[in-house]
Amino acid sequence: MENNDQKKKGIKSKTYYCPHCRKPVMKGDVKRLNMTCPSCHKLIDALGDELLNQEDV
Ligand SMILES: [Zn+2]
């Protein structure tokens, strides 16, 4: 469980994860991600909410 993001008050910063390799690709707050993953170099084109950390698995 990682609570790092919640410690920054006033800054909406979420961590987005690649749907292909599940590595973190960027932090921020975006509605949609359209970029190439720096880890696996595959194209990511998805809604931001779909790429958030799934820590309740
Ligand atoms: Zn990737």
Image (tube, grey):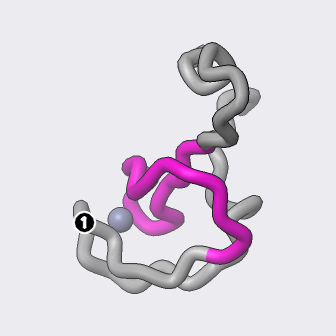
Residue 3 point in image, percent of width and height: 62, 15
The C terminus appears in which quarter of the rendering?
A: top right
Q: Does the magenta-highlighted stretch encompass residue 11?
A: no
Span highlighted in magenta in the image: 14-32
In the rendered structure, the answer to whether residue 54 lies left or right of residue 19 reads right
The residue positioned 60% from the left and 41% from the top of the image is 13
Residue 17 point in image, percent of width and height: 50, 54
Residue 36 point in image, percent of width and height: 34, 79
Task: Return the residue at label 1.
Answer: 38
In the rendered structure, the answer to whether residue 55 lies left or right of residue 43 reads right
Tell how many labels.
1
Nearest the camera: 41 or 35?
Answer: 35
Residue type (three-letter) at the residue carrying disc 1: Pro
Using the rendered view, name the quadrant where residue 42 is placed. Answer: bottom left
Using the rendered view, name the quadrant where residue 4 is placed. Answer: top right
Q: In terms of image quarters, where does ligand 1 lie?
A: bottom left
**As drawn, 44 above or below 50:** below
Q: Does the residue labelled 1 lie within 8 Å of ligand 1?
A: yes
The residue positioned 24% from the left and 61% from the top of the image is 39
In the rendered structure, the answer to whether residue 36 lies left or right of residue 1 reads left
